[in-house]
Structures are given as structure tokens and as C-alpha cells.
Image (spheres, rainbow, N blue to C red):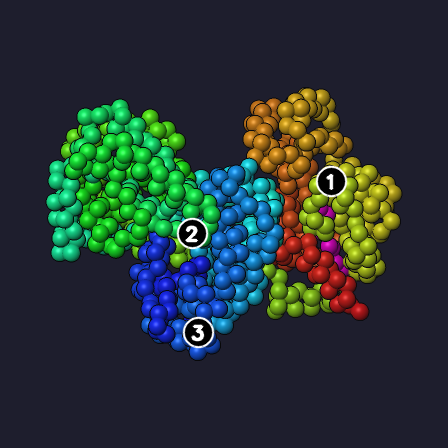
Amino acid sequence: MKQKLILVSNRLPITIEKENNNFNFTPSVGGLATGLSSFSKTHESLWFGFPGINAENLTTDDKKIIKDRLINDFKSYPVFLTNNEVKMYYNGFSNKTIWPLFHYFQVYTDYDSETWKYYKLVNEKFFDELIRVVNNGDIIWIHDYQLMLLPKLIKDKFPEARIGFFLHIPFPSYEIFRLLPWRKEILEGILGSDLVGFHTFSYARHFLSSVQRVLGYEHIFNQINTSERSIKVDIFPMGIDYDKFANAPKDSKVKREISIIQRDLKKQKIILSIDRLDYTKGIIQRLESFDLFLTKYPEYIGKVTLIMVAVPSRTKVDRYSNLKNIVDETVGRINGKYSQIGWTPVWYLYRSLPFYNLSALYSMSDVALVTPLRDGMNLVAKEYIASRLNKKGVLIVSEMAGVAEELGEAMSVNPNDKEGIAEAIYTALNMSIEEQQHRIKLMQERLKRNDVFKWASQFIERLQNTKNIQEKLMVRILINEMKDLFLSNYKKSQKRLILLDYDGTLVSFKQKPEDAKPDKDLYKILEDLVSDQNNKVVIISGRDRDTLTHWLSKLNLTLVAEHGAWINRDGKKWEALTDLTTNWKDEIRPLLETYVDRTPRTFIEEKEFSLVWHYRNADIDFASIRQKELKSHLLDIVANLNLGIMEGNKVIEIKSLDINKGKISQKLVGEDNYDFIMAIGDDWTDEDMFATLPEEAYSIKVGLVNSKAKYNLYSNKEVRELLKELTSANK
């Protein structure tokens, strides 16, 4: 079956309206629709989304007509929503909860459990439609904040699907994101993806931090490793259809519009502002900055015009209708204050403009004023730069917009600094032609290289690469035929050595170490293993002797404590495996105590031959900084003491270099002529054990990560299931 590319977004790139029992199909407004509509035409694809007409207004026959037309003519598939679903899911949770919170407008954010229910319901509705056409192996690219639960829904049903998710708005810092009551569900939903994309590094960094803090998943080089999969997080600044905007000024329709603007404005300088009417766009602050500019530089009165295009947006949301009233009043006040016969300082257009009108404005404007209070990317800035046929013009851009990181030659301003924006306008209007052309040329070259087609192809290519890496790791999972051979070899063997790590392997990591004691299920598994006289079962752990004795001494196990410092073969007597001193502790302990004092909720664990600094309960980011500092200090101290620094799961352990799981494993393997050897572990300390085992041994790493072990299992749950299969194999 041929692989498909399925694009999913809240809205289709086509809007359907019913008029006199006929349906009109028109392009949707928005950066995503504009960017991906041209890309989707070059691939065998299908686009899922809401068509913009409510289900209550349609008969069954209407829906069939719309669906057939969309599929056949536009390669699109409608997800029909009721008026109430749109109200609660889109106008409600998406735009009254996620949108303001992710744009740092906490005071505007509603936390309504009822709209959250509808958000889940509509995500499930998208999923119900998708499963009609999705096959395992398809590429599914999901877009934006309205569908953050969808990736997991798909992954649970189609684990082999290649799922990408791209967030087109900012992802906030953890301090903001943590305010969301449903933060865990949102992150788990997104992590159903194989690749998660953002416009900028800061958004990706905030996301990784939130994942680590909320879900506890570590990340290395922007790769999140869960027990089941690795998920890549990467940066893809969205581009535009550069040639479309660069060639537009040559079009006869655009030229005609340019002539009209030149006739009306004569020799005036033009400042252009184009936005959706949204409180995140900084429109009020922009108008007030222009007011301040005219006050400070009255010589420009009658000589410069601000053309402000405000595209209607979310008109049914109260906050947006209130914003329009304020904008109307502010424009009226400025025009009343400065207008002269034949000149109006602000041309205010509250409507969406066709492409040729926009292109003419881009081409004619001397300055583009793009100053959102917070913006995921902002394609208007890129469209303006691409449209500068004569390479003249100045872009003033907010440092809070994602595009600011990419267009470094633009004039950068703080959108809340009205004085700074007024000064930037003055500087822009007086900038030399040579400097304007130099800046524009550099930005145009960059935008041409990184257009929307490259953006999309890079994302799909990276998604394919991520999936290939996952598949290579999946080959190592001990399943199906490999497991059958494994069980067969176990069953026919006569002398077996089974080496088992404890924390993270037999039990999950716990916030409190004492909570990790064996439960009834684990105790029964170990009892069954040791009851087979052919088995020598060894628990080889980093825990201290007293804990292992208390938990496991009643079983006929061999216990190894402190990573190989101690061994207990009979459940009673502990034997030191090497002659070690502990004088070094007096030198190391004060340093660890200092870091405990400096890092709240960390603590020291003292073992017979090691000291451990635990930071699993501390603030992750703060503890990570302290961990690096401590490690640096320790390296200077331990170099001449024959000590090693071992990093485990949110711990730093200092111990003798003569102690490691590899040495004790090698010793145990050499004590008998075993015809079946198995070792299972999850931590870096277990890598020493895996490395020393003979070639024929079965070494198994817990977690889907690279390892010296031959095989992987997803989690301690799968480890237990495997051990149960072993115990039942001989029955």
C-alpha cells in the first residue's frame, strides 16, 4: 500500500459557504494555509480540517457533496463540527486558554473544565475521521495548538505511523506553562509525535524544560527518550513562497494598484502595518508610538502616513470585539489630533485585502512596522522583505517575534517601548538608501534560500530520519522470533546465571527511595526464579547492604550491594569484594554538604564505600546547574585519590575506581560453567556489566536508548513480563 502524506490542521485551506443552495469554495486566510497549500500540491497528500461551515447548516446530502468536491478537487477531507463544538473547542479552550497563556497573557486566560472537555472531544473527532484513511507507515503532519492531543491518539492506534507536530505559536516558559491544569495531558498528547517542531530555539528549550519537569523525561541533544520511543525536538523557522512575493510587483494588476496609491499619497512617506486584529499584535502600542513620533517630530506632519490593515479575527470572542473598539477610538483620536486638509495620518482598513492589494502596499511602503507583543513567527515581515523589488525600505520588528531571530538586519525594538519605537521610525525614515539596500539584500538572500518549500521538505526529511533511528533501535527490542529463540535457549540450558539490576529495572524510580521496596508481584517473580535449581539469580544494585538485606534476604538470592563493593551469597553474611579505605570521605563530605545547603531538597546518602548526592527531588533546572558545578569541583579533588565519579538517575556517586558492576559480573561469570547468561539493567552503571559479559550472553537494556547491551526492553513492566515467561517456560 502506497505511503500517504496527511496534513492536519484546525482549518482546511478551503472555506465553504452556502449561498442560495450552492456552495462557494474560497481560500482560507492565514499563514499556515498560505504556506502549506502550495506545498501540498507538490505531494500526494490529503489535508484534514474544519471547512468553516457548521454541521447544523448542512443536510446529509450537503455533507456528501462537500466531501466529494473537497476530496476530488482539493485533496482535502472535511471534519464537520457543530456550532457548539466550534464555540467551546475553538473560541473557548483554544483561544481563551491556550492562545493567551502561550502568548504570556496570563490575565486573559480562562481555565474552564467544560471547554477542556470539548477540546478533548474535538481532537477525538479529528481522530475518528483520520482512522478512515490512515494506514501504518503513513506520514502525518499535525499543525498547531488546536490539535495537541491528536498525535498520541494516532500513535496509540497506529504505532508505525510517522507523526510530526508543528507548533506555530510560542511555547511558553515552564513558569507560564505550569499554570495550565491540563499540562500533563497536553505534553503527553504532543509526545505521541516522532518529531516536534518549533520556529525558534527558545520555544524548543521551553518545551523540553516543561517535558522534563512535568513528565520527568530527560533529553540529550534535543532528543527525548521515553520508555517506548525516542522523540526528536527541532527548530524549523517557517518560510514564505518567496518567488510569489518577489515577482508580484511586476504583475500588471499590482502595478495598477501601485499607481493608485502613488496618486492618492503623492510624495508622502508610507509606514505599513498589517496584522490580524489580536491583542498579541501590539496594535494599540504601535498607534500610540506613531502618535508620539508625530509629537516629537512635528516636521513630519503632512509628510508621512501610517497605513494600518487590521484583518478581522475571532469576532465572536468578547476580548476581540473590545479591542476593535479601542483601536477605532485610538485611530480616531490620532486623526482628529493631526489631520490637515488633504492629509490623514492613519489610513485604517479593517478588512482582509486580496493579494494584489497587499503586494502593492508591500512594494510602496518605505517602512514596515511589525511590533507584536508576542508572536510565534510573523510572516508579514518576510513578505515585506521579499516584495522589495528595488531593495529599498526598512523593516522595524519586535524582538518578541520569532522572525527577529532570523532577520538580524532589521531594526529590532521592544514592542512596549513607545519611545524606542518612535525613535526607530525616525531613524528608518532617515536611513541612507545604501544602508537600506545592504540590509534588504542580505535578508532577501536568506529568505530565498529558506522558503516555505525548504521548510516543509526539511521537516518531512527530518521526520523520516527520526523514524529511521527509532526503527534501528526497535530492531534491538527482544520480541517475536528473537524472544522465541531466547526462551528456547533458556529452557534447554542446565546452568543459568541471571544478573538483575534493581531500581529502574525491576521497579520504577520513586521520589522517595524507600518506596521502591518489592511489591507482591515482584516478590513472587523472584521466588519463582530462585525455585528453579538451575538458576543462580543475582540482584546487583547500587543500594546499600542494609536495604537489600531488609527487602530481599528471605529469598535464596545472591545480593550485590553498592555496585559491587559487597556480596551476600546466603542471605546472612556480607563479604567485602575488595580491600578499600574510606578516609577520602572526610575530604569529600564537606563539599557535598555545601551543595545540599545551596540546593534545596537535595540530600546525601552515605554507603560503606561511597557517597551519593541525590537531586531527584530538587528543581530540575537549578539542580542541573549545581550538578555541573559539583562535578567540576569533584574532578579536581578525586584525580589523585583513585576515586571515580558516577552519574546515575539524578545522582552523583563518588566511589573507588576498583568498584563497578563489570568487575563483579566478570567474577560471577567465572565461578561456574554457565550455558545461559542473562543480564538486565537500565542505568549507565550497568554498561560496565554489559561490556564484560561473554559474547553468547543475553544483555538487555531497559529503555529505548543506545547501549552496549544486545537488546532492549521498553520498561520495568516488560522486564517483569519477560521474567514471568522464563519461570513458566519450564512448567
The foreground one among 332 and 598 is: 332
In this rendering, is residue 311 above or below 655? below
Direction from residue 555 to residue 412 in the image, left or right? left
Instruction: Report crowding for label 3: few under 14, some 14 to 19, many 20 or more residues within 10 A (C-alpha).
Output: some
Q: Residue at x 30, y 60 (%)?
A: 38
Mark 3 lies on residue: 63
**Which amino acid lies under the numbered mark 2 shown in the image of this protein?**
Arg
Q: CA distance from mark 2 to mark 3?
A: 25 Å
For marks 2 and 3, the one nearer the N-term is 3
Q: CA distance from mark 1 to mark 2?
A: 48 Å
Q: Residues within 10 Å of mark 1 (few under 14, many from 20)?
A: few
Q: Residue at x 31, y 51 (%)?
A: 351
Amino acid type at image mark 1: Lys
Q: Amino acid at mark 3?
A: Lys
Residue at which label 2 appears: 314
Q: Quadrant of residue 341?
A: top left
Local SS, label 3: helix
The residue at the point 25 percent across, 55 percent down is 354
Q: Which residues are magenta?
A: 495-503
